[in-house]
């Protein structure tokens, strides 16, 4: 039985180590909130409300002009218990630690890391900034341009210039490397691209450019018609710093899934603004659809959008309100088409948190929990009398949140 404990203890350590090594998105985002979750004692439960920075207007002159403090918040939920389970024999539990790790622990950790990243990439639906042509791979004529455009969107939203990352699908990275091979690079960087098929660090304003098999694919809504803002349904405004609404007309009648969460639109003559100075930026504001939307029998619909259309004040998101009959343009590609959603982001745009799980005390043959650098897994082996085997389970508890969606940009291909 002593070897069983040694194997399980080693399994928990190796699961954690290999999970960290295989994690791509989760290793590049904000991790500062892990310590607030489920550490004995003083547990806070499964959710945490995180205060976001307030925004202000700068006064001109000597007259006092108080800013209203909105104290915007984002809720981080850690309720996703994920695990890998399998049945083993007593003989398996007494094999060497190295053999057990190779057969069971290593592939389990790889699957867990891929699942965690997959859930993180799904946050693309909350990100409105977008570049690229959905459904079309980048080329030598536009690949570098798209990478730099995405970086420019992040910069224009006052993100710090460090800690920036770009994660693409494996196929998109192939296109990027081919597109950028003629740019000025050191001989070492060119050699790395040639031999390893990967970018070196510090490329085009990013700390690194990586590829992942877990990048999400977006399926666009079944939209059609000449879409316009419809003020007859009511004003198109939203609460400060919260998702707002947009009433539209001109769509096809009675379509389910007319827009899908993650679709992106612009509104004619509604431009983005610098969040610090509130000055107009030279491009239309992007809005992401945050919930699936249908049209009624008259082709009308109310869209949930983010960010909200906020005109004026410290939390302004646009340079003007949406006018009645203003044209709406969809940037998500052709109706019902699919596109890969690569992500460019500052590390603080997203957060990934893990919590320690409780350890059982009864019915256990061997159990171990390992927490290092705010990553945590437990491994438990217990007897199953139904089939005279050992049940082994690996568990982690994690959650994701998009803290600053304006500090990220999609590259849709």
Image: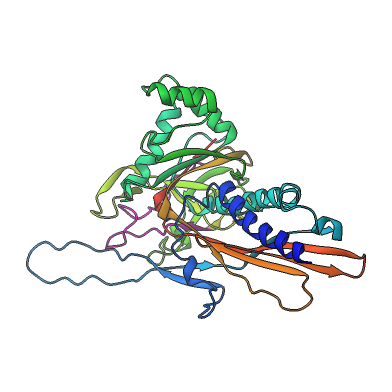
* Whether residue 297 can be seen here: no
Region rendered in magenta:
303-332
Residue 251 locus on image (x, y percent): 57, 48
**With 244 as the anchor, is 215 left or right in this view?**
right
Please indicate, yes or no, whether residue 127 appears anywhere in the rendered image.
yes
* Quadrant in the picture for the C terminus: top right
Query: For this rendering, which residue is in front, 322 or 189?
Result: 189
Residue 236 lies, with reference to residue 36, above or below; the image says above
Q: 23 or 119: nearer the eye?
A: 23
Residue furthest to the left in view is: 62
Q: Position of residue 312 (x, y in %)?
A: 28, 60
Name the image quarter holding the N terminus. bottom right
**Closer to the camera, 354 or 128?**
354
Q: Position of residue 393 (x, y in %)?
A: 74, 63
**Magenta segment, prevailing SS (helix, strand or loop):** loop
Question: Is 83 colored magenta in this rendering?
Answer: no
Q: Position of residue 260 (x, y in %)?
A: 59, 51
At a point 29% along the width and 63% down the height, the residue shown is: 55
Determine if the magenta segment contains residue 319: yes
Q: Nearer the viewer, residue 125 or 172?
A: 172
Looking at the image, residue 73 sits to the left or right of residue 331; the answer is left
């Amino acid at each position: 039985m002593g070897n069983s404990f040694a194997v399980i203890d080693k399994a928990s350590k190796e699961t954690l180590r290999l999970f960290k090594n295989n994690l791509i998105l989760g290793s590049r985002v904000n991790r500062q909130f892990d310590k607030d979750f489920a550490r004995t004692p003083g547990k806070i439960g499964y959710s945490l409300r995180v205060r976001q920075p307030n925004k202000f207007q700068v006064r001109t002159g000597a007259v006092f002009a108080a800013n209203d403090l909105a104290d915007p918040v984002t809720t981080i939920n850690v309720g996703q218990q994920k695990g890998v389970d399998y049945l083993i024999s007593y003989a398996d539990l007494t094999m060497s630690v190295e053999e057990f790790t190779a057969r069971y622990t290593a592939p389990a950790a790889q699957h867990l890391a891929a699942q965690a990243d997959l859930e993180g990439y799904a946050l693309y639906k909350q990100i409105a900034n977008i570049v690229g042509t959905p459904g079309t791979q980048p080329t030598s004529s536009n690949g570098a341009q798209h990478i730099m455009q995405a970086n420019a969107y992040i910069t224009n939203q006052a993100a710090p210039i460090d800690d920036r990352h770009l994660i693409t699908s494996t196929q998109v990275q192939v296109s990027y490397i081919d597109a950028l091979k003629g740019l000025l690079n050191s001989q070492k960087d060119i050699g790395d691209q040639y031999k390893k098929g990967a970018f070196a660090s510090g490329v085009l304003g990013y700390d690194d450019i990586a590829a992942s098999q877990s990048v999400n694919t977006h399926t666009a809504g079944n939209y059609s018609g000449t879409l316009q803002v419809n003020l007859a349904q009511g004003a198109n405004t939203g609460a400060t710093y919260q998702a707002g609404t947009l009433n539209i007309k001109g769509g096809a009648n009675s379509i389910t899934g007319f827009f899908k969460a993650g679709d992106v639109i612009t509104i004619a003559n509604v431009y983005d603004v610098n969040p610090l100075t509130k000055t107009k930026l030279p491009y239309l504001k992007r809005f992401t659809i945050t919930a699936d939307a249908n049209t009624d029998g008259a082709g009308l619909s109310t869209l949930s959008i983010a960010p909200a259309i906020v005109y004026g004040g410290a939390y302004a998101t646009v340079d003007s309100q949406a006018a009645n009959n203003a044209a709406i343009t969809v940037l998500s590609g052709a109706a019902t088409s699919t596109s890969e959603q690569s992500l460019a982001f500052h590390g603080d745009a997203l957060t990934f948190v893990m919590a320690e799980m409780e350890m059982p005390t009864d019915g256990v043959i061997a159990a171990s929990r390992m927490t290092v650098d705010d990553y945590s897994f437990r491994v438990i082996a217990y007897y199953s009398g139904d089939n005279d085997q050992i049940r082994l389970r690996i568990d982690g508890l994690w959650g994701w949140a998009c803290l600053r969606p304006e500090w990220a940009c999609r590259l849709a291909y």
